[in-house]
Image (cartoon, rainbow, N blue to C red):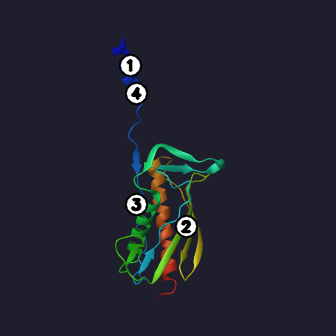
């Protein structure tokens, strides 16, 4: 009887184990290149606490945060956003040194870029909404609101649309960095 109870308990325990989570990552997207930009340091990106979690936040509409059940970011979102934005800026500013403030490389920058993300999720229309403040230290500041429609409602397509929105943010920052250059 004890063996049967133990076997039943182990079956229930292993039967209730959660599946392996699906991991997702943002990816750089190509944009217009503009050579001759300044040496740039990208400060760590500020995130609202509701986004600073391993789960993918799908929506914050109707006063409710909706999370992916078994969908996680492959790395901390702030770190990933900094990495992808840096890659996007490097592609758009060929010949410019673009580094993060916490990276292993140090340099004297011509510009320091700061980004405060306020939103990165799906809005009521089904579009990815990226809302942020971007600033060039000693230069301008810009409020950013971008909407990118995913190809479908799958998490993969939502993350792809988020990557596109981060690429569009890089385009805006590139314009801010190039505003005083020919």
CA gap, disc 1 to disc 4? 9 Å
Q: Earlier in the sequence, mark 2 or mark 3?
A: 3
Count of marks overlaid on the render:
4
**Nearer mark to the viewer, of 1 and 2:** 1
Label pair 2/3, CB-CB below 8 angstroms = no
The image position of residue 70, as x and y in percent, is: 45, 42
Q: Closest to the observer: 5 or 33?
A: 5
Disc number at residue 13? 4
Task: Reply above or below: 80 against 104.
Answer: above
Spatial CA span between label 3 and label 1? 45 Å
| Residue found farthest to the top | 1
Residue 156 in the image: above or below residue 102: above
Residue occupied by mark 3: 27
Pair 2/3: label in front: 2
Whether tag 3 and tag 1 are in contact, CB under 8 A, the answer is: no
Location of residue 182 in the rendering, given as x and y in whole percent from the top left corner: 47, 88
Sequence-wise first label, 3 or 1? 1
Callout 1: SS = helix
């Amino acid at each position: 009887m004890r063996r049967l109870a133990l076997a039943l308990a182990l079956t229930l325990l292993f039967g209730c184990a959660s599946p392996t989570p699906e991991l997702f990552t943002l990816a750089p997207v190509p944009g217009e290149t503009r050579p001759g930009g300044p040496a740039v340091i990208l400060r760590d990106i500020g995130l609202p606490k509701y986004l600073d979690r391993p789960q993918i936040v799908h929506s914050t509409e109707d006063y409710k945060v909706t999370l992916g059940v078994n969908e996680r970011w492959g790395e901390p979102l702030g770190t990933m956003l900094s990495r992808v934005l840096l890659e996007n800026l490097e592609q758009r500013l060929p010949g410019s040194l673009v580094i993060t403030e916490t990276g292993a490389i140090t340099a004297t920058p011509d510009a320091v870029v700061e980004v405060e993300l306020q939103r990165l999720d799906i809005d009521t229309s089904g579009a990815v909404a990226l809302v942020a403040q971007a600033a060039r230290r000693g230069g301008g500041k810009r409020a950013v609101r971008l909407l990118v429609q995913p190809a479908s409602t799958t998490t993969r397509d939502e993350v792809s649309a988020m990557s596109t929105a981060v690429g569009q943010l890089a385009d805006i920052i590139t314009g801010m960095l190039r505003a005083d250059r020919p």
